[in-house]
């Protein structure tokens, strides 16, 4: 008799579980977020959201861009979806996932208020945008002219060959998805990309797989300049007292967008929509801007790193990378291989890396 | 003669306007469906041809970069090749480059293939399902030479149909809205036009409705639409023939009546003379013959009166005259037959002027009085004639104390030659004459039997 009652109870629980997972009318439970953003940076947003929706808890999984992409595709292929929302600054990979039909639409008035470069198909949304800058060690440039643009940098390397030997650092674009995206955009937008690449190669640059290590080395004076660094990280170091300086390239300043979408087969779809709506809302955007030190995509939000602040200090045009199918071009296998080969040839091969002990 | 009491049936009969609108609505609805098909087919074609150009451009720009390096097919997808497709803002984009052996060189390996041969360098378009959506593809061939052999490399670019569908829907909508508005306008125009076109018919109907039963004069053809003029013409002709026949008949009857009167008078004088010398037995026979002769004379008199009234009703000579005088004159004319009776005429009016045909009205009054004398006269009763003003006209009532009038005659006093039940009854023409006169003067005739016996006939004629 007791066994039977227990079985009935079990069956009842099973039924309840089924019905709640099939009809998630009211958002609750756990929302899983795969993200490339450091948890420390995102923590205020998570806290604020959970304060607003106590019935939803966020499972924040921090991953690098390429593993995030591969893990998600593998899970979707095996029909074992775990992620509800994917948030990554590797915009090209995010766009490809959406193009391949892994996303579900999220329609709201807040989403419609995003600038047109920050949304595509009602499915993928740019939440923040971050200027991509050159970071210099102020001590290293004492008494020297700081290069203001890509052409400045190339000319400086040519003229002052001795100074630059081993003192320039940048992403390893073969292993960093964001680094690859930025290099590809440089190749697309800049007429001087070839010149710059050639000059950078001559300086025997240090190649980094991890942004923190790159910034550490600039801070310590091991290298003098970091090229294509996400501005927010540098700003955070400067706020902490590092003797660094940010240069917004005068010819144009790229802005990379953190793009988010809801997985088509999200286990907690309702919760995912609630979180996305929060991220797109003024409150969420303001939290991103003021407490996470990211620049909000919504134009209504100013903040310390908002568009206006950057435009004020940057003399060049700000070029947010638009979310759209064009981004998939550089993901083409042949194109990628050719692009990497050219880059590695120019940089003198992948052998000389700054530090490869941390993230792969 | 004309259907006077048929207006309720006319409401049930189909209206030209309703039928036109109904048929037009049906054909327009069918037309709209056909137009919708045509418009949406054309819109889809238009949307396809404009977006196909984009798709072909994208494929061509990819094909431009095809080269053979180290015996391998090499392609450098231009950024613009995919970016230009974002002109269709929300559409997903797929592409593939495959070698002569059919293997994908780059891009999405599992794209659906074009069914059928494709070995030329012209762009070929087709729709196929891919990743849960219908995708529009273009396939473009480029001939390459590799390892001493030539083969075709195929560039395939595809795009989902969201923007095309949206454009086609917008085009269809914009094409159909004016047509729909035009249809509504046409229906409105038909409604109004048919109303105007039918108005003369309604006028003719009203005119015929108002007519006297004996009025066979032609309908005015001037304001009749050309389409129904033949009908009206035929009708007029028909009525003309009828009128002619009736007049001829009337003339014949009047003639006969007149011709018979003289020998009859002579006959009756002879009878009177014979009566004086006759023995007792033959006297009663002679009396009976005399009475028959009187009735015959009365009938002839009525026939003449009827013919006169009918004739004048065709062309009434309306003039102002004193009704009171007409009554007095009628009494004088009726006097020879009523010399033994008690007839009283009372009126507070010094004069009662009406517009009408005096001869006809006199004839009517004469018949009313005569009827009262013939059917209502009793030794103890008297005939009361009263003339009074009522509403916009004058009321002349003739009351007797006779046995009353049969109900069917009260219901339809205008019918001729109803067999009379009264032993002294006439030919039943008297009330028909009165009715004819009253109607041609737009007056009213009212007959009523009193409960205590006796009949009152009231004739109302409008004042001038």
Image: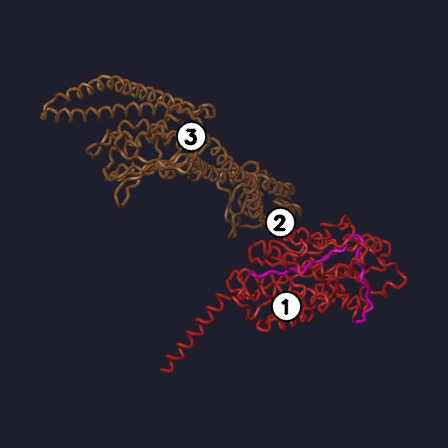
Chain colours: A red, B brown
Between the C-alphas of marks 2 and 1, the distance is: 31 Å
Between the C-alphas of marks 2 and 3, the distance is: 98 Å
In this rendered view, identify the residue nearer to me: B254 or A47: B254
Q: Is residue A115 left or right of residue B225?
A: right
Chain that bears disc 3 = B
User: Which element carries disc 3, helix, strand or loop?
Assistant: strand
Q: Position of residue B425 (x, y in %)?
A: 22, 32
Q: Is residue B148 above or below residue A224?
A: above
Q: Position of residue A32 (x, y in %)?
A: 58, 68
- Observer-side mark, 2 or 1, equals 2
- Read off the magenta span: A240-263
Q: Which residue is mark 2?
A: B89
Q: Which residue is mark 3?
A: B322
Where's the C terminus of chain A, which quadrant?
bottom right
Chain that bears disc 1 = A
The answer to whether tags 2 and 3 share a subunit is yes
Q: Is residue B3 left or right of residue B355?
A: left
Q: Which residue is mark 1?
A: A62
In this rendered view, identify the residue nearer to me: B80 or B49: B49
Queried whether the magenta region covers residue B202, the answer comes back as: no
The extreme bottom residue here reads A2
Where's the N terminus of chain A, which quadrant?
bottom left
Q: Position of residue B52 (x, y in %)?
A: 58, 41
Q: Which mark sits nearer the N-terminus, 2 or 3?
A: 2
Between the C-alphas of marks 3 and 1, the distance is: 121 Å
User: Which element carries disc 1, helix, strand or loop?
Assistant: strand
- Observer-side mark, 3 or 1, equals 3
Q: Position of residue A127 (x, y in %)?
A: 67, 61
């Amino acid at each position: 008799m007791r066994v039977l009652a227990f079985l009935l109870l079990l069956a009842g629980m099973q039924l309840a579980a089924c019905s709640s997972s099939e009809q998630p009318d009211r958002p609750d439970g756990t929302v899983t977020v795969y993200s490339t953003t450091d948890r420390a940076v995102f923590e205020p947003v998570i806290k604020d959201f959970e304060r607003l929706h106590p019935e939803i808890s966020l499972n924040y999984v921090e991953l690098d861009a390429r593993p995030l992409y591969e893990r998600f595709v593998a899970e979707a292929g095996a029909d074992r979806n775990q992620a509800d929302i994917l948030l990554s600054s590797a915009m090209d990979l995010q766009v490809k996932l959406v193009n391949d039909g892994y996303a579900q639409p999220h329609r709201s008035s807040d989403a419609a208020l995003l600038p047109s470069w920050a949304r595509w198909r009602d499915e993928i949304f740019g939440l923040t945008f971050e200027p991509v800058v050159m970071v210099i060690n102020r001590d290293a440039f004492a008494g020297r002219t700081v290069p203001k643009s890509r052409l400045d940098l190339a000319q400086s390397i040519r003229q002052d060959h001795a100074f630059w030997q081993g003192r320039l650092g940048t992403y390893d674009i073969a292993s960093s998805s964001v680094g690859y995206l930025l290099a590809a955009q440089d190749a697309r937008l800049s007429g001087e990309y070839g010149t710059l690449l050639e000059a950078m190669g001559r300086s025997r640059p240090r190649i980094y797989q991890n942004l923190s290590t790159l910034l550490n080395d600039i801070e310590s004076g091991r290298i003098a300049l970091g090229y294509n660094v996400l501005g927010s990280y540098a700003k955070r170091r400067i706020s902490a007292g590092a003797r660094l300086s940010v240069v917004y390239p005068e010819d144009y300043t790229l802005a990379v967008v953190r793009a988010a979408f809801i997985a088509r087969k999200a286990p907690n779809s309702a919760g995912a929509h609630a979180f996305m709506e929060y991220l797109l809302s003024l409150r969420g955007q303001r939290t991103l801007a003021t407490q996470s030190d990211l620049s909000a995509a919504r134009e209504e939000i100013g903040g310390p790193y908002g568009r206006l602040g950057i435009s004020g200090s940057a003399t060049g045009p700000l070029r947010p990378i638009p979310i759209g199918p064009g981004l998939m071009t550089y993901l083409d296998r042949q194109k990628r291989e050719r692009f990497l080969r050219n880059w590695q040839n120019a940089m003198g091969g992948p052998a000389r890396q700054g530090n490869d002990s941390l993230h792969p | 003669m004309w259907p006077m009491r048929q207006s309720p049936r006319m409401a049930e009969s189909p209206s030209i306007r309703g039928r036109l609108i109904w048929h037009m609505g049906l054909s327009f609805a069918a037309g709209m469906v056909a137009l919708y098909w045509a418009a949406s087919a054309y819109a889809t074609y238009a949307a396809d041809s404009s977006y196909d150009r984009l798709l072909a451009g994208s494929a061509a720009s990819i094909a431009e970069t095809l080269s053979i390096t180290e015996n391998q097919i090499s392609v450098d997808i231009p950024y613009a090749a995919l970016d230009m497709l974002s002109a269709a803002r929300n559409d997903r984009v797929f592409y593939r480059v495959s070698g002569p052996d059919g293997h994908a060189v780059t891009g999405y390996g599992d794209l659906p293939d074009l069914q059928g041969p494709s070995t030329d360098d012209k762009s070929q378009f087709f729709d196929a399902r891919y990743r849960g959506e219908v995708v529009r593809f273009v396939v473009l061939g480029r001939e390459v030479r590799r390892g001493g052999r030539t083969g075709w490399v195929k560039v395939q670019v595809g795009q989902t149909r969201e923007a095309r569908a949206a454009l086609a829907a917008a085009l269809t909508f914009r094409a159909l809205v004016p047509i729909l508005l035009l249809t509504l306008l046409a229906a409105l125009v038909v409604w109004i036009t048919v109303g105007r076109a039918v108005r003369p018919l309604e006028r003719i109907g009203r005119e015929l409705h108002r007519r006297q039963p004996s009025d066979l004069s032609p309908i005015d053809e001037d304001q009749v639409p050309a389409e129904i003029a033949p009908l009206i013409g035929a009708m007029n002709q028909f009525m003309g023939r009828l009128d002619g026949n009736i007049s001829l008949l009337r003339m014949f009857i009047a003639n006969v009546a007149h011709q018979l009167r003289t020998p009859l008078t002579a006959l009756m004088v002879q009878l009177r003379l014979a009566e004086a010398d006759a023995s007792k037995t033959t006297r009663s026979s002679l009396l009976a013959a005399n009475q028959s002769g009187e009735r015959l004379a009365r009938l002839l008199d009525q026939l003449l009166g009827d013919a006169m009234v009918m004739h004048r009703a065709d062309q009434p000579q309306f003039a102002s005259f004193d009704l009171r005088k007409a009554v007095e004159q009628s009494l004088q004319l009726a006097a020879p037959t009523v010399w033994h009776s008690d007839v009283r005429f009372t009126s507070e009016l010094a004069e009662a002027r009406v517009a009408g045909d005096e001869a006809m009205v006199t004839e009517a009054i004469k018949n009313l009085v005569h009827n009262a004398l013939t059917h209502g006269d009793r030794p103890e009763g008297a005939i009361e004639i009263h003339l009074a003003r009522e509403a916009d006209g004058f009321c002349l009532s003739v009351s007797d104390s006779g046995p009353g009038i049969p109900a069917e005659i009260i219901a339809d006093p205008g019918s001729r030659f109803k067999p009379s039940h009264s032993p002294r009854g006439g030919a039943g023409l008297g009330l028909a004459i009165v009715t004819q006169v009253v109607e041609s003067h737009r007056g009213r005739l009212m007959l009523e039997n009193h409960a205590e016996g006796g009949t009152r006939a009231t004739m109302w004629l409008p004042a001038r």
